[in-house]
Image (cartoon, rainbow, N blue to C red):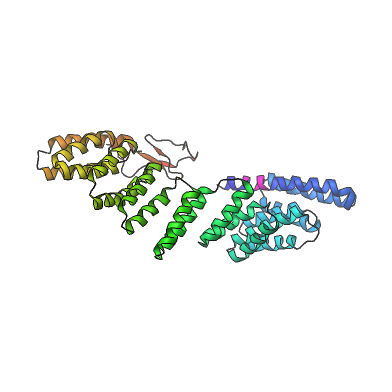
Amino acid sequence: MAFVTEWFWFFLLLPIAALGGWVIGRRGGERHSDSQVSRLSTTYFRGLNYLLNEQPDKAIELFLHIAELDKDTFETQVALGHLFRRRGEVDRAIRLHQGLVQRTDLTDQQKVQALLALGEDYMRSGLLDRAETVFTDLARIDQRAPQALKHLIGIYQAERDWPKAIENATRFEAATGEPMGRLIGQFECELADRLRSAGDTRAAREAVARAYAADSTSVRAGMLEGRLELEGGNDVAAIRAFERAARHDTDYLPELLPPLLEAYARVGDRPGARAFLTEMSEHYRGVAPVLALTRLVEADEGVASARTYLAQQLKDRPSVRGEAALIDLTLADGVDPTATLRELRHITDQLLVRNPSYRCNRCGFGARSHHWHCPSCKEWGSIKPLLNYAVV
């Protein structure tokens, strides 16, 4: 890791040194004597030498010295401030960037760059109110500074000020053309959650509608709409909302099923619930819809039918939760467990084949066989046997 860090500093500072040397060389005839240009150029080469010899601290000191000698090296000073911030010397970065902001000889573009750097310093130091002021002023005077809007979105998100986060995300989309609908949809859902908890159902519904307008496939908006309908006693509307959300993204089915089945039970539409669960079982490879449908089969057709259905389904989608349910049904049915034990052994074998026996403790990569060199993160010696894996 030390080697990687040193090369990170090298690649960060090398462009600074090259740019600074070019600036000095270009401006030397205009603003410096030959001896001064030669002295500064020599200092840059010394700094590069320190970088090549993996001595970044000494290189930084030299570049800082150059920045102090030649106050016109704007790019060098901005970059040094960024470097101080990365190293945790935020106060030093703030002082440097504050000095740049106060200069009267900067171009408009340089002023924007200095203000952005100062606002990022304030964010890093936790001074969110100062950062907000800087970025707000910057976004107001220069609509071409979308980075300021992006930082404002981050600040208001941290402060959970959802109306302002939505406002600035909308402005960012207008300024850059980058779609922000999914993020705005999440912010509207956060606002709807807050309003729902406060008992303002009408405003919560309006926020959900805005979330749909921003992101028409928002699963979260569908879940919120379903809960609002359930709380309002509109079970049929709740069913529509939950089912629409499930079809948008079946991965959320385990979260959606409990309130959806509650709504189905309240309207007494068991055939509708079974039809939906059968549909979901064809599209969702997890065991959640199968277990829910097993319970309905048991209620309608008895324990034996439910056990037969579940055992058949688990052959294609082995699951520990499914095994537990199958054991319970077998015990409840009071039949000879021999056939069930054979089925459980088959399911267990499938689970063992699918699950990794080794995992990288650095990146989480899972493998069935051991690797000394992780194929994912390229770390050596990081892949180890899992605790539940044993060779007999």
Q: Quadrant of residue 250?
A: top left
Residue 272 on the magenta span: no
Give residue 304's position: percent from left, percent from top. Answer: 13, 39
Q: Which residues are magenta?
A: 7-12
Give residue 29's position: percent from left, percent from top. Answer: 89, 48
Residue located 24% across and 36% down the image = 313
Residue 60 appears in the rendering? no
Give residue 258's position: percent from left, percent from top. Answer: 29, 51
- The answer to which of 199 and 348 lies nearer the viewer is 199
Q: Quadrant of the C terminus?
A: top left
Q: Main secondary structure of the magenta part?
A: helix
In this view, 192 is above or below 14: below
111 lies left or right of 369: right
Residue located 25% across and 37% down the image = 348
Residue 208 appears in the rendering? yes
Residue located 74% across and 60% down the image = 100
87 lies left or right of 386: right
- The answer to which of 111 and 362 lies nearer the viewer is 111
Give residue 8's position: percent from left, percent from top. Answer: 62, 46
5 lies left or right of 289: right
Looking at the rendered structure, the number of numbered marks drawn on it comes to 0
Q: Quadrant of residue 61?
A: bottom right
